[in-house]
Amino acid sequence: MAYEIKRFPYDGTVDADGHILEPPDLWETYLEEKYRPRALRIQVDDAGYEYLEIDGQPSQRSRKGSLGLLGAMGEENMRPSPDRRYADNFPFGASNAADRLSLMQQENLEYCLLYPTIGLLWEVEVTDPELSLAYCRAYNRWIADFCRDSGGKLVPIAQLTLLDVAGSVRELERAVKDGCRGAWVNPFNHNRVIHGASVHDPLFAKCVELDVPFAIHPTFTPHAAAAGIFDWPREGRAWGEALWLRSIVQQALISFFSLGTLERFPTLRLGVLEAGSGWIGAMLDRMDAYTDSLNIKRARAADIFRRQCFISGDPDETTAPHIIAHVGDECFMWATDYPHPDHPHTWVDDLTRYAQALPIGTREKVLGGNVKRIYKLES
């Protein structure tokens, strides 16, 4: 089934987590000359299948033609093929800024925050802090250029790495000056330091200084982080892995509460993306229950979350509308994830049902008001 464009019935709507498909030559073009021999590239193996080349080596995860499926939203045939090439399968608006603005106008979206696609794949296999930061810098330069002439409607978000905190602090400052409106990191860390640890405080301090949000977004994750899932039979592994991704995002989020990070930085705006939102109420209840049962003297997690955090949910969630008022309607937003194939192309119908379940004031916040406020889109 091809992607069907429909118009969303509510004005002022913002996509909090859309994606683009990067041009294959992005890193060869935007990397500093020193790193260009180590650029990310798309190559073809002896059987004719595309694979991602990382630092001169074939990727172990992004291979066997999987790159050609990255823009297959709404399609029934999800099998890799030598004839199915990444650059030949860009859906409308996935790689061209003018087309994306046209798509947004047709769907009645006011703003779209943009995140990468290939950028979600490579970090699982790169442990070199210097190269990781160089890859991030190249992408950030490109996404700022991609969004530059959109009148602010396409919103670039900078990719950072926790492998080089000092370097990411410098890159965040540079990227924000170049137009990026926030930053994101993946939910794991090769150096095994959890996200909320104090070693990352300089980055959180810079976010506060620059007054930009910091978010956690799912990516490919090391198999060692969930070895049991990757031992599943092949027919169930992809399904299980896709659902498990939410768990590692939740672990990263919990660390900001358990280590007191949000209390050290009471004006840091922290987000959780593409991991659903209906679970957050139960998690906050459990964190506060442990605080009470262990007699820990600290602020309640639910209060901190309402004060500082935000979470993006999926249009087809059925439980989220029922817990928004309890958690706090200023904390929720939604996203299309366009054009990734693991989210339904029927988001307009799904989000319409979602929105109709919300009181008018809450609806306005969740559909767009919260993103505009948190990312200062209209300042």
Image: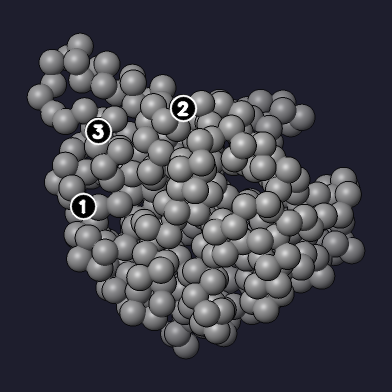
State the residue lying farthest toward the front: 360
State the residue lying farthest toward the bottom: 33
Q: Quadrant of residue 168?
A: bottom left
Comes first in the chain, label 3 or label 1: 1
In the image, residue 197 above or below residue 247: below
Viewer-nearest residue: 349 or 338: 349
User: Position of 196 compared to 333: left or right?
Assistant: left
The residues bearing labels 2 and 1 have C-alpha atoms spaced at a distance of: 24 Å
Please, what secondary structure does the residue beneath circle 3 have?
helix
Residue drawn at x 34%, y 21% is: 285
In the image, residue 35 above or below residue 229: below
Name which residue type carries label 2: Ile
Residue 261: x and y in percent read 20, 43
Please, what secondary structure does the residue beneath circle 1 have?
loop
Residue drawn at x 54%, y 65% is: 111
Q: Nearer the viewer, mark 2 or mark 1?
A: 2
User: Position of 173 compared to 55: left or right?
Assistant: left
Residue located beneath label 1 in the image = 267
Residue located beneath label 3 in the image = 303
Q: How is the image coloured?
A: one colour
Residue 235: x and y in percent read 77, 29
